[in-house]
Image: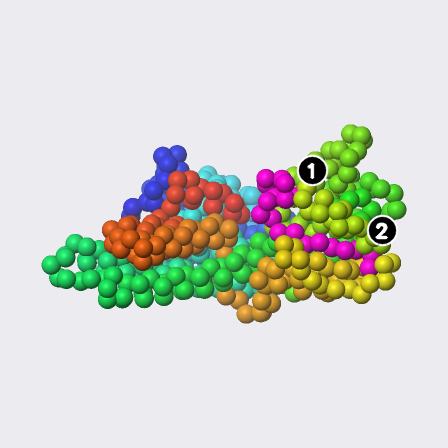
């Protein structure tokens, strides 16, 4: 089987999975529990099982038995399962030893397996082998990690759908229709004697527009899946005493931040992870933005700007009770927009303390920024803010899982769409069939990166290194 295109160091350790190397790891979470699982995969898995259990297990049958070390000492008793290749998760011989869930017992079993020829598995190596042996594609492998890391019910449902192949089927369908169109275009170029005028007959343009529409739909669903899985990072910023910490507390539903009337109380970043109707939010409260001679406060302000640079959205809090002028608002907004790292970061203006200004809660827009008038202290207008956050991120709120997606998937989908747009320009403006065919090829490659049909250098290493040990 040919490996994806990778650098030599990565190719070396990927090849180890295909050379009969046997791996072992604890597959259950660290700590104590009723049951703990040790998983073994590779050519020596059955041999190791026979030595530890003192018999040859029947494939896909649960056997209750004793587990022995190399000296014949009984380590524990439990359940043994054997899954012969290729009908296993990794596509290799796989053995699972289900013992009592104590860390010492499980470590003893791993040691016994290691003495019989297995080596400790790297992070994500079981899933990596499943990918290399064509049991799952790259998107499905990532879905395993996403399912484990899910923090909401909707995220878990989406990851489960991706693991079952929902996302991959969408991508493979797109690759197929792009391939068909590319074949048609290249045939018209290579066989002009057939008098196929793909510009005049309109078929290519019609198919190209249909593919672009199909890709746009997948992009929308992928953005929703990414939002549900990874969440949105909100950074709360503003001048001292504007109510930033009160807003953090109101969103999190608990007293996460200290709130006082003293300016500069918040000197470092505070983080909370919450969810709104299943949408994960990563909220960061920051130090007040102002000129200060205090060295500690200066560091807090520097960290505030650093957090804003990685934000999906900035909540710029303004104290409405202090009758802020238009110039105050414009100065704050302009200071953000003048930062080259924040020029494209969306901003929501939060006019806080509407209970003191005696203005009703409201949601409006200036064209450049949304404006929410609320009281973080009383809670008035907080539902408007939550609805706004769901809307601005395109959150539908449906409980039905579609599929999970990651930022790298969104990047590849956008690249694929950009190539289709470029091909559209070549077709409609220049009538350049050769260039259209090349754009379609590049589109195929970008889509192939998602499932692993095409992989960039070091991509696999980065993905699987983020997995759990034993998965």
Read off the magenta span: 336-354
The answer to whether any part of residue 70 appears in the image is: no
Q: Is residue 196 left or right of residue 21?
A: left
The circle on residue 322 is: 2
Q: Earlier in the sequence, mark 1 or mark 2?
A: 1
Residue 376 percent across, percent down from the top left: 80, 57
Q: Residue at x 62, y 63 (%)?
A: 391
Residue 339 in magenta stretch: yes
Residue 218: quarter of image: bottom left
Q: Secondary structure at mark 2?
A: helix
What is the crowding at mark 2: few (fewer than 14 residues within 10 Å), some, or many (at least 20)?
few
Q: Is residue 349 above or below residue 19?
A: below
Q: How far, Cα to Cα, is label 1 from label 2?
A: 26 Å
Front residue of this view, candidates 243 and 151: 243
Q: Which mark is residue 303?
A: 1
| Count of number-bearing discs | 2
Above or below, 63 against 290 in this view is below
Instruction: Report the residue at 34% width, 42% height from top.
Output: 5
Residue 293, compared with residue 224, is above or below; it is above
Does the image show residue 89? yes
Residue 121 colored in magenta in the image: no
Say above or below: 403 vs 450. below
What is the number of the mark on residue 339?
A: none
């Amino acid at each position: 089987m040919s490996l994806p295109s990778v650098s030599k160091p990565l190719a070396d350790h990927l090849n180890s999975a295909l050379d009969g190397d046997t791996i072992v790891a604890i597959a259950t979470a660290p700590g104590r529990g009723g049951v703990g699982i040790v998983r073994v995969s590779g050519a020596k898995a059955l041999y190791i099982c026979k030595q530890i259990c003192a018999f040859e297990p029947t494939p896909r049958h649960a056997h209750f038995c004793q587990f022995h070390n190399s000296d014949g000492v009984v380590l524990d008793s439990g359940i043994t399962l054997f899954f012969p290749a290729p009908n296993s998760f990794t596509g290799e011989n796989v053995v699972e030893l289900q013992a009592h869930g104590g860390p010492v017992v499980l470590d003893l079993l791993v040691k016994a397996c290691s003495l019989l020829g297995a080596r400790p598995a790297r992070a994500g190596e079981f899933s990596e082998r499943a990918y290399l042996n064509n049991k799952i594609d790259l998107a499905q492998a990532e879905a395993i990690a996403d399912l484990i890391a899910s923090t909401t019910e909707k995220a878990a449902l989406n990851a489960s759908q991706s693991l079952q192949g929902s996302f991959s089927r969408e991508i493979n369908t797109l690759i197929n229709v792009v391939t068909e169109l590319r074949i048609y275009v290249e045939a018209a170029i290579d066989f002009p004697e057939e008098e196929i005028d793909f510009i005049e007959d309109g078929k290519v343009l019609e198919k190209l527009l249909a593919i672009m529409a199909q890709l746009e739909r997948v992009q929308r669903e992928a953005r929703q899946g990414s939002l549900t899985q990874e969440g949105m990072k909100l950074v709360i910023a503003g001048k001292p005493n504007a109510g930033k910490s009160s807003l953090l507390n109101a969103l999190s539903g608990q007293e996460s931040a200290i709130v006082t009337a003293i300016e500069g109380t918040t000197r470092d970043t505070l983080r909370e992870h919450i969810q709104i109707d299943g949408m994960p939010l990563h909220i960061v409260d920051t130090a007040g933005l102002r000129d200060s001679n205090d060295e500690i406060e200066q560091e807090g302000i520097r960290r505030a700007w650093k957090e804003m640079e990685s934000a999906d959205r900035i909540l710029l809090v303004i104290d409405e009770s202090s009758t802020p002028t238009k110039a105050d608002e414009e100065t704050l907004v302009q200071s953000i927009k003048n930062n080259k790292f924040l020029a494209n970061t969306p901003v929501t203006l939060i006019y806080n303390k509407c209970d003191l200004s005696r203005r009703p809660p409201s949601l409006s827009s200036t064209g450049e920024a949304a404006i929410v008038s609320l009281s973080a202290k009383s809670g008035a207008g907080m539902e408007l803010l939550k609805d706004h956050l769901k809307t601005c991120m395109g959150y539908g709120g449906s409980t039905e899982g579609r599929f999970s997606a990651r930022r790298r998937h969104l990047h590849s989908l956008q690249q694929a769409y950009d190539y289709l747009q470029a091909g559209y320009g070549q077709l409609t403006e220049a009538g350049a069939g050769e260039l259209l065919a090349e754009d379609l090829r590049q589109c195929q490659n970008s889509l192939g990166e998602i499932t692993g049909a095409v992989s960039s250098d070091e991509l696999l290493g980065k993905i699987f290194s983020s997995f759990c040990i034993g998965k």
